[in-house]
């Protein structure tokens, strides 16, 4: 950390369960040279990767549907969320991670992946950098039913949707997941779907 306009004075560990929650007190130098004291909480769950699988010939995409507690707590009546396959990097690099997650969650063993973006998804409170990928899939790449890794309580439903249905779901708000919206919009803009 090399920004001379930031001086961290105190870091408190608030939780270290599934991820790490810290309260940080720091000094911030304004443009006029004056200093202010700020306190913020920062949630660190590691970095992640997400992928959109698409099939040009069949004009389909693979998405997932699973229960997401935070969405349920914030008004999503069922808690179910349609989203692109994704996962935390753990010890893997982003490309290795997304290949592994794709097979675990969707049942497809993909070969060629293309990185398209990397972005902070909620920089006001979460440290996570998300790496975005796309990959073409074919039916012969399917090696299992997917559904998530045994023992991780994911209960993932694999969805194979026509391009038109995925775009409709995006436009009607049925798809509300940010990473999925970014990936689908990228695919539309670049004539992948």
Image (cartoon, rainbow, N blue to C red):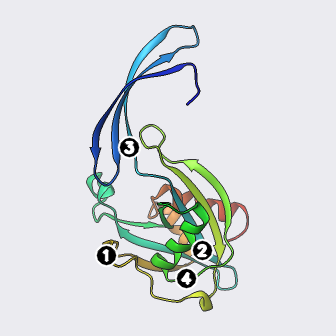
* Mark before the other along the chain sequence, 3 or 4: 3
* Disc 1: CA contacts within 10 A as few (<14), some (14-19) or many (>=20): few
Q: Which residue is mark 1?
A: 151
In terms of secondary structure, where does tag 1 sit? loop
Q: Which residue is mark 4?
A: 108
In this rendering, which labeled residue sits more in front, label 1 or label 4? 1
Asked if the residue under mark 4 is in contact with the one under mark 1, i.e. CB atoms within 8 Å, the reply is no
In terms of secondary structure, where does tag 3 sit? strand
In this view, the residue in front, 179 or 36, is 36
Image height check: is 173 above or below 135? above
Question: At 61% from the left edge and 65% from the top edge, which residue is drawn?
Answer: 95
* Mark before the other along the chain sequence, 1 or 2: 2
In this rendering, position of residue 132 left or right of residue 16: right
Image height check: is 41 above or below 188? above
Position of the C terminus, as image quadrant, is bottom right
Asked if the residue under mark 2 is in contact with the one under mark 4, i.e. CB atoms within 8 Å, the reply is yes
Image height check: is 30 above or below 129? above
In this rendering, which labeled residue sits more in front, label 1 or label 2? 1
In this view, the residue in front, 28 or 67, is 28
**Mark sitting on residue 43:** 3
Question: At 55% from the left edge and 88% from the top edge, which residue is drawn?
Answer: 142
Q: Which residue is mark 2?
A: 53
Residue 102 picture location, percent across and down: 52, 74
In terms of secondary structure, where does tag 4 sit? loop
In this rendering, position of residue 64 left or right of residue 12: right
Asked if the residue under mark 2 is in contact with the one under mark 1, i.e. CB atoms within 8 Å, the reply is no
* Disc 4: CA contacts within 10 A as few (<14), some (14-19) or many (>=20): many
Question: At 55% from the left edge and 19% from the top edge, which residue is drawn?
Answer: 5
């Amino acid at each position: 950390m090399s920004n001379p306009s930031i001086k961290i004075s105190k870091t408190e560990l608030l939780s270290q369960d599934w991820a790490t929650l810290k309260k940080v007190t720091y000094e911030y130098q304004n443009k006029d040279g004056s200093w202010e004291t700020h306190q913020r909480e920062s949630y660190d769950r590691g970095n992640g990767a997400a992928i959109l699988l698409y099939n040009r010939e069949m004009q389909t995409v693979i998405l997932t549907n699973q229960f997401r507690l935070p969405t349920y707590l914030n008004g999503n009546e069922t808690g179910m969320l349609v989203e692109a396959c994704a996962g935390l990097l753990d010890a893997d690099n982003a490309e290795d991670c997304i290949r592994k997650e794709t097979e675990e969650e969707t049942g497809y063993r993909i070969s060629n992946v293309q990185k398209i973006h990397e972005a902070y998804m909620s920089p006001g409170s979460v440290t996570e950098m998300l790496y975005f990928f796309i990959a073409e899939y074919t039916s012969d790449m399917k090696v299992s039913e997917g559904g998530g890794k045994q023992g991780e309580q994911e209960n993932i439903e694999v969805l194979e949707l026509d391009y038109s249905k995925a775009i409709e779901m995006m436009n009607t708000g049925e798809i509300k997941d940010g990473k999925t919206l970014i990936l689908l919009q990228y695919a539309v803009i670049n004539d992948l779907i």
